[in-house]
Image: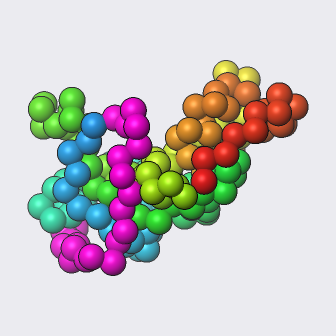
């Protein structure tokens, strides 16, 4: 089976933010609207190994994160909304020729970009599973603060988390 190949026309219409302080270093090669990723993704359950070539870079076409983000681009806690995907890889894996991934980013009110993540509603540490029904979108800051707690535990703790 031949790997599908796509070219992303780079556009000035995608507004990016400043790198978030403490952000992991990535090698970034392309930006795209969420619709591009959603249009070209394959269902995670059906094709975990399917790849696609984007601007000459090999990436996965099937990711559970893409499914979670297709359900919602908005952090369930603070309300910040992902607005663009970046095709990138961790600098550490870049040196070793590691794979590229589409990471979803939002822009905070103060102009910083923030990575959007998938979160386990019931944490795996508390018996939660990896099924899509147990996943939700959270920004990285809220997800790290939530840790191994459930949303209801977090509300009882009165976290007061606001990123946007």
Residue at position x 40%, y 37% from top? Answer: 21
When asked about the image quadrant of residue 145, the answer is top right
Span highlighted in magenta in the image: 4-24
Residue at position x 54%, y 58% from top? Answer: 109
Near-viewer residue (61 or 100): 100
Furthest-right residue in this view:
156
* Residue 135 x %, y %: 64, 46
130 sits to left or right of 111: right
Q: Is residue 60 above or below residue 123?
A: below
Furthest-top residue in this view:
125
Q: Is residue 44 above or below residue 22?
A: below
- Quadrant for the N terminus, please: bottom left
Furthest-front residue in this view:
110
Instruction: Report the predominant secondary structure element of the magenta stretch.
Output: loop
1 sits to left or right of 19: left
150 sits to left or right of 64: right
* Residue 55 x %, y %: 15, 65
* Residue 126 x %, y %: 73, 23
Q: Is residue 124 magenta?
A: no
Residue at position x 43%, y 74% from top? Answer: 35
């Amino acid at each position: 089976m031949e790997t599908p190949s796509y070219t992303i026309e780079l556009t000035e219409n995608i507004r990016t933010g400043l790198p978030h302080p403490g952000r992991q270093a990535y090698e970034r090669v392309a930006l795209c609207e969420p619709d591009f990723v959603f249009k070209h993704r394959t269902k995670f359950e059906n094709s975990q190994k399917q790849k696609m070539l984007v601007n000459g870079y090999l990436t996965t076409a099937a990711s559970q994160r893409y499914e979670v983000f297709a359900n919602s681009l908005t952090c369930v806690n603070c309300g910040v909304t992902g607005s663009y995907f970046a095709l990138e890889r961790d600098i550490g894996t870049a040196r070793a020729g590691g794979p590229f991934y589409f990471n979803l980013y939002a822009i905070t009110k103060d102009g910083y970009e923030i990575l959007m993540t998938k979160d386990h509603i019931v944490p795996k540490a508390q018996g939660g599973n990896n099924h899509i029904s147990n996943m939700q979108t959270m920004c990285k800051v809220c997800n790290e603060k939530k840790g191994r707690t459930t949303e209801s535990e977090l509300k009882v703790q009165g976290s007061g988390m606001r990123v946007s």
